[in-house]
């Protein structure tokens, strides 16, 4: 999972204190966090809760499943079906449906 994939699920100042890519503002942000302990702790707790949900086995299975479906759809030839009775990501991810509730849950929270 790349940083750009995560940016849709974590918001600046709600789930993390933003730091410039070149780290120019790192010292300033550390000073801010020390001066605003309660706010920094709330941000850390919100990030922890989000990460626990986002990286849960169910959501990870949904991510893998949707990624594989995406690449499958892009391929020129179909992939052979698994043998009967084989456990697939379909089984893990709500009977083969992409976990749209993953994005719905996070989008709903972002617009609060």
Image (tube, rainbow, N blue to C red):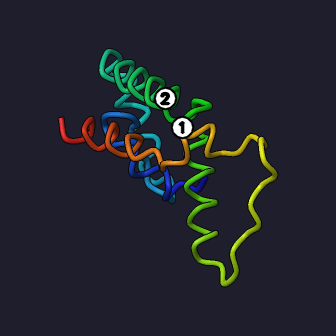
The image's mark for residue 96 is none
In the image, what residue occupies the spot 44% across and 30% down? Answer: 50
For disc 1, the marked residue is 59
The answer to which image quadrant residue 101 occupies is top left
For disc 2, the marked residue is 53
Relative placement, left or right, of 106 versus 84 is left
Q: Nearer the viewer, residue 78 or 70?
A: 78
Is residue 92 depicted above or below 69 in this figure? Answer: above
Mark nearest the camera among 1 and 2 is: 1
How far across and how far down the image is residue 16, in percent? 40, 37
The answer to which image quadrant residue 112 occupies is top left
Relative placement, left or right, of 106 versus 89 is left
Mark 1 in CB contact with mark 2 (< 8 angstroms): yes
Q: CA distance from mark 1 to mark 2?
A: 7 Å
Q: Secondary structure at mark 1?
A: helix
How far across and how far down the image is residue 69, in percent? 59, 62
Q: Nearer the viewer, residue 91 or 70?
A: 91
Relative placement, left or right, of 79 versus 59 is right
Q: Nearer the viewer, residue 22 or 91?
A: 91
């Amino acid at each position: 999972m790349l940083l750009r994939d995560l940016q849709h699920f974590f918001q600046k100042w709600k789930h993390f204190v933003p730091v410039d890519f070149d780290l120019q503002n790192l010292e300033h942000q550390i000073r801010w966090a020390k001066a605003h302990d309660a706010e920094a702790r709330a941000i850390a707790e919100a990030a922890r809760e989000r990460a626990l949900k986002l990286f849960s086995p169910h959501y990870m299975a949904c991510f893998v499943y949707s990624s594989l479906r995406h690449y499958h759809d892009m391929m020129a030839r179909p992939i052979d079906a698994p043998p009967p009775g084989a456990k697939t990501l379909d089984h893990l991810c709500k009977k083969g449906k992409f976990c749209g509730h993953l994005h719905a849950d996070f989008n709903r929270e972002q617009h609060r």
